[in-house]
Amino acid sequence: MPLSSLAHIPVSCSGGAYQVSVGPGALELLPEAVAKSGARRVAVITDSNVGPLHLSRVLSFLPPDSPHFIFPAGEASKHLGTIGEMLDFLAREQLTRSDLVVALGGGVTGDMAGFTAAIYLRGISVLQLPTTLLAAIDSSVGGKTGVDLPQGKNLAGAFWQPRAVLCDTDLLSTLPRRILFDGVAEAVKYGVIRDAALFRLLATPGGFQENLRQVIARCVEIKAEIVAGDEFDRGERALLNFGHTLGHAVERESDFAISHGQAVAIGMVAVTRLAEERGWCEAGLHAQIAQALELYELPVELPYPWERLAEAMLHDKKRRGNELTLVVPECLGRCVLKTLPVAELAGERLLP
Ligand code: GLY
């Protein structure tokens, strides 16, 4: 496949613009991206699932003897202890401020390698090489980095934009179906918040599988537009959290046995049901969203009593005092933010 078939999406941010390149073979742009960064040394951070699959190919595009660090795959590694190990690694390898970290992997890797790059020597460049759909369309773009604390997900972190994102769709071909479909939940999210045509494509059997590059590129375009308008998450960037407040509560209650994408799927349907009950959106929208998600074997029913989830939502980092802001759809392609008192939410009944 010629590299001309790649889509290049610019993301504007306070530190200047960067590009997200999407398509088969995007990895081949790595030497050019490294040269552009001016780095003399490049360190790769990856996990124990992705390393055996893709590390040697990535290293083949980098200067000889580029060091790498592999941590145990999974959300359980996403804590400050692992960040300490990553910092030790960069210091041991004597990376300097003008060098580069490459984050090779899914959301956990991108978030942690990005955060490590943000604080090592008070900040060195990071390039994101996402290997999951979820990382490709969401976490690798927009500069949110961080780790979990015992008290909750992503409670410590920094905004640290990457130098570039190379999303090689060939790398997604090794993904187990469940992990690929996890990312589709986020793609459906973009459809509901900004693009009814994207939603309809995803709601058509085969629509996603036959248009992978286009779907990723469109999701990244939407994210880039939103991030350009609100890089530091003080306003409309919150729209990207559609389904997430409840989703995070579901993830937490399941002790992460329910994956992020599955939890977001459940959250989007439940919040849309609430919006319908309150008359904020057209009737039947939650069923439409549920039907689309079920095409990708994603769950759509609340797995726990509402009271338990409402309690868990009290710990959401986006809570302000006694209020939580939820993203609610008005129609396909348009969502708004609604701030509700927590006590009122706790009194809702979202179970069928
Ligand atoms: N993942 C949500 C955001 O980047 O704001």
Image (cartoon, helix red, strand yellow):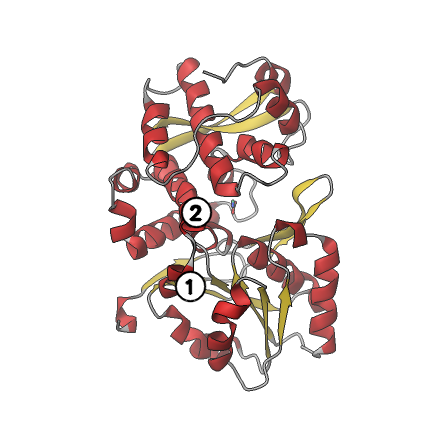
Disc 2 crowd, CA 10 A, few/some/many (<14, 14-19, 20+): some
**Is there CB contact under 8 Å for labels 1 and 2?**
no
SS type, badge 2: helix
Looking at the image, is 135 positioned above or below residue 289? below
Q: Residue at x 57, y 32 (%)?
A: 250
Tell me the quarter of the image containing the N terminus.
Answer: bottom left
- In which quarter of the view is residue 286 placed? top left
Amino acid residing under circle 1: Gln
In the image, is 58 to the left or to the right of 76?
left
Rendered image: mark on residue 19: 1
Residue 273 at least partly seen: yes
Q: Nearer the viewer, residue 271 or 287?
A: 287
- Pointer 2 residue: 178
Disc 1 crowd, CA 10 A, few/some/many (<14, 14-19, 20+): some
Amino acid residing under circle 2: Arg
Looking at the image, is 212 positioned above or below residue 162? above
